[in-house]
Image: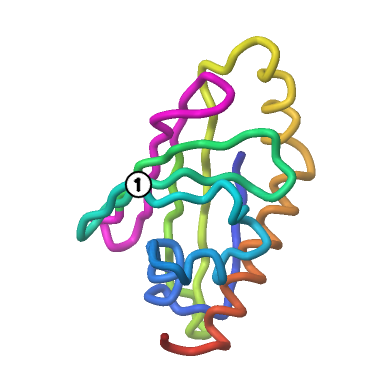
Amino acid sequence: MRFDVVTKASPGQVRDALTDFTDRRLRIWNRTLDPKTYELRDRGDTWAVARESSPGSPFWVVSRYDWSDPAVIRWTIVESSYGGGGDGFARIEPAGDGGSRLHVEWENTGARAAQRAMLVVLHRGPMGRLVARMWAAALDRYAAAGPG
């Protein structure tokens, strides 16, 4: 899946929203993160490991996030319900109006045959546009709410 997002959130706010693994994560990403499956497993200064899924999705993943590069948030799938892995990143750039532009890519690899077709459908076509709109809305809400 590949998509681009333009948001009112500053690059710092985008980074904060993507790397917030406190209890606020479920509020920030309330439309894209299912509280029933979310579980923070481990966390350091520039990394975290969490189990996540989207509401209504038949899939969950455990991803290791890394944000040691201030402009890029990376994740690697270390466990999944579909039997495979994958990785992705979100590259954050400042926009001229104080907001940000994000370029996001991720892929799933090694899925069991039964899940492979559904993952292809989810990662191609209109799904990227839908996810991009949900990310933009979440980040715009985050920017409007201000610090904390």
Q: Residue furthest top?
A: 113
Observer-nearest residue: 45 or 9?
Answer: 45
Magenta-span inclusion, residue 78: yes
Q: Quadrant of the C terminus?
A: bottom left
Q: Residue shown at 66%/18% (left/top)?
A: 116
Total number of numbered discs in the rendering: 1
From this view, report whether residue 43 is shown above or below residue 81.
below
Q: Give, as a three-letter code, the residue at label 1.
A: Arg
Residue range highlighted in magenta: 67-87
Residue bearing the label numbered 1: 41
**What percent of the width, then of the height, locates residue 13?**
43, 76
On screen, residue 68 versus residue 107, left or right, reads left
On screen, residue 10 versus residue 111, left or right, reads left
Q: Residue furthest front?
A: 36
What type of secondary structure mainly makes up the magenta span?
strand
Q: Residue shown at 60%/77% (left/top)?
A: 140
